[in-house]
Image: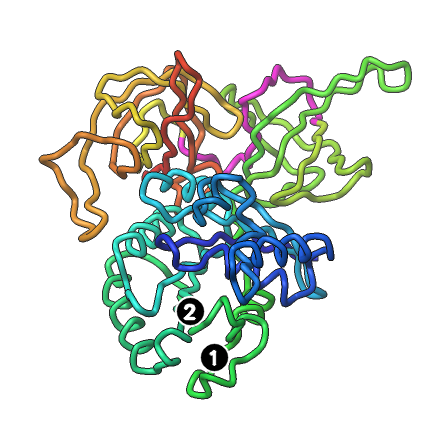
Amino acid sequence: MELLRFTTAGSVDDGKSTLIGRLLYDTKQLFDDTIETVERISKQKGLSHLDLALITDGLKAEREQGITIDVAYRYFNTPKRKFIIADTPGHVQYTRNMVTGASTANLALVLIDARNGVVEQTKRHSFIASLLHIPHLVLCINKMDLVNYSEDIFNRIVEEYETFAAKFEIVDIHFIPISARNGDNIVDRSANMPWYKGPTLMYLLENIHIGSDQNLTDCRFPVQYIVRPHSEKEHDFRGYAGRIRGGVFRTGDRVIILPTEFFTTIKEINWSGTTVKEAFPPMSVTMQLGDDIDISRGDMIVRENNVPKISQEIDAMICWLNPKKLLVNGRYIIRHTTREAKCFLKEIVYKIDINTLHRNTDDKEIAMNDIARIRLKSAIPLFYDPYRRNRITGSFILVDEFTNETVGAGMINQ
């Protein structure tokens, strides 16, 4: 069954957690004890309706404040698809959590309060979704019940957002008027908005095409682990384990090993205890090669006529995630696919103004939640593709070499 990963985003109190709670509730995904707990807490809070946000707000501080602080993951499935949801925070100081939740998503749900329209956090999260090249974006105009289900207000917000979104690259955008609290246009079509002729949110999630989201052209296999059982039965077995990050590998393919650039062929591919003839993303497999070659973690197996870029110089966009500011000539550890190396920041090219999307070349002070274009140099060569071509081989994280904290998430430009 096909798996769709999607994330929610939006400003504070736009109803992200309530929307997810409504999805799970209306699709019968909740256990009776969960529903009983939500009913009990809702009554304690003096509410006349179920506070469905409690389903995803798992931290005590979240329930007390009525906000989302950390990323909450929820899993459910329908007869058509499996789903992984990342409920991300709306506060500015938790933007880094939104980056974490959105990094592997096929689709982003951006909520807009119908009373407020497009606000700064809407722009911030939409830009991050564009920066992360999330293939599909769904704008949910929420709380339509509080504006009397007005078609004019919906159309005004759509027009305002389309004007803003024209500044960056998002190929597939959908707009849906909803009420997460009342369930309008979530699973069932709303009788309160007969003027809306588009799909419900659940129908869109079940049917949106994601088959072409993976890069099946560029063969990329970062080696994660060397398998040597040393058993009597498999005394000479040597396999290379990892996850396919691009392309389709087949038994008999002629491949090249990076960085040594030795040529060999694929002798056998093992997946989940069985031998398969081909492997593709995101399968985790063990490959046996036709020749004995010195290969270690961090090396990459690719097709001989389709190699990634190999360089120590990296030009990238960075989302800064740490209270400590990004420093020119600062020393960090870069983790890219299965490769890890020391690096230093050569240059901050510009900082992005989230509201206008303008490039600020005067103010290059990068603090937490800022987004900037940088150039860095690693101690060893990295094997990468531009992020727009491959979201896995085109991304990396920066780690503080003293505290081991993840301080930045990067997307490689060229």
- Which quadrant holds the C terminus? top left
Which residue is disc 1 drawn over? Answer: 198
Asked if residue 257 is among those painted magenta in the image, a careful observer would answer no
Q: Magenta residues, as a range?
A: 289-309
Question: Mark 1: few, some, or many residues within 10 Å (few <14, many ≥20)?
Answer: some
Residue at 26% x, 63% y is 166
Q: Position of residue 99 (x, y in %)?
A: 41, 42
SS for callout 2: strand
Res. 378 visible in picture: yes
Q: Position of residue 335 (x, y in %)?
A: 45, 25
Counting residues from the N terminus, which is met first, the one under dot 1 or under dot 2? 2
Residue at 32% x, 29% y is 314
Q: Is residue 156 above or below residue 391?
A: below
Res. 211 visible in picture: no
Q: Is residue 42 above or below residue 71?
A: below
SS for callout 1: loop
Q: Quadrant of residue 405?
A: top left
> Label 2 is placed on what type of residue?
His
Which residue is disc 2 drawn over? Answer: 174
Q: Position of residue 87 (x, y in %)?
A: 50, 49
Asked if labels 2 and 1 touch by Cβ distance under 8 angstroms, the answer is yes
Q: Position of residue 292 (x, y in %)?
A: 68, 17
Structural distance between the alpha carbons of marks 1 and 2? 9 Å
Locate residue 226 relative to residue 144 in the image: left or right: right
Say which mark, if any, is on residue 394.
none
Residue at 66% x, 66% y is 27
- Dominant SS in magenta: loop
Question: Mark 2: few, some, or many residues within 10 Å (few <14, many ≥20)?
Answer: some
Q: Is residue 405 above or below residue 120?
A: above
> Label 1 is placed on what type of residue?
Gly
